[in-house]
Image (spheres, grey):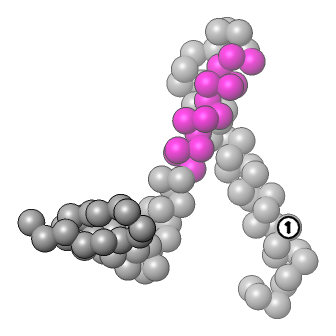
Amino acid sequence: MKRVKLVGRILLPMQMDERISFVWWQWRRQKLPLVIFVLLCLNLVIAPAVYAAVDGTLERRQVWALGLLGLVTLGLTVYLFVVVFQPERF
């Protein structure tokens, strides 16, 4: 397996470098799957905080739903804020 020097001292296999470039290329084409993945990762941080705040009175499924609802609400708020103040972009 051929190794490629990526950054500084980090050496990655050639296959890994090809995978990174493929993911980067796909990210430029399709951003929705990446956004969904990032939101789910953020929910991994938010859900335990919500679960701790309610002191165990809610089930885990309800906590995940509340976390996703909060992320969607925040996303819509940012989107509408941008649409209101920069309407010429849309």
| Left or right position of 18 against 49 | left
Q: Which class describes the residues within 10 Å of circle 1: few (<14), some (14-19), or many (20+)? A: few
Which residue, given by chain and number where applicable, does mark 1 sit on? 81
- Tell me where residue 30 sits by quadrant: bottom left
Name which residue lies at 38% across and 79% down.
25
At which x and y percent is residue 64? 57, 31
Q: Position of residue 47 (x, y in %)?
A: 61, 29
Q: Is 40 included in the stretch rendered in magenta?
A: yes
Q: How many numbered discs sit on the rendered protein?
A: 1
Q: Is residue 90 left or right of residue 85?
A: left
> In front: 33, or 1?
1
Q: Which residue corresponds to the image point at 50% horizontal and 66% vertical from the top-left?
A: 32
Which quadrant would residue 46 be assigned to in this image? top right
Q: Secondary structure at mark 1?
A: helix
Asked if 5 appears above or below 88 in the picture, the reply is: above
Q: Residue 76 falls in which quadrant of the image?
A: bottom right
Q: Nearer the viewer, residue 48 or 56?
A: 48
Task: Write down the region rendered in magenta.
Answer: 39-53
Q: Residue at x 45, y 62 (%)?
A: 33
- Horizontal arrangement in the rendering, residue 31 relative to residue 2 (left or right): right
2 is higher (above) or lower (below) than 39: below
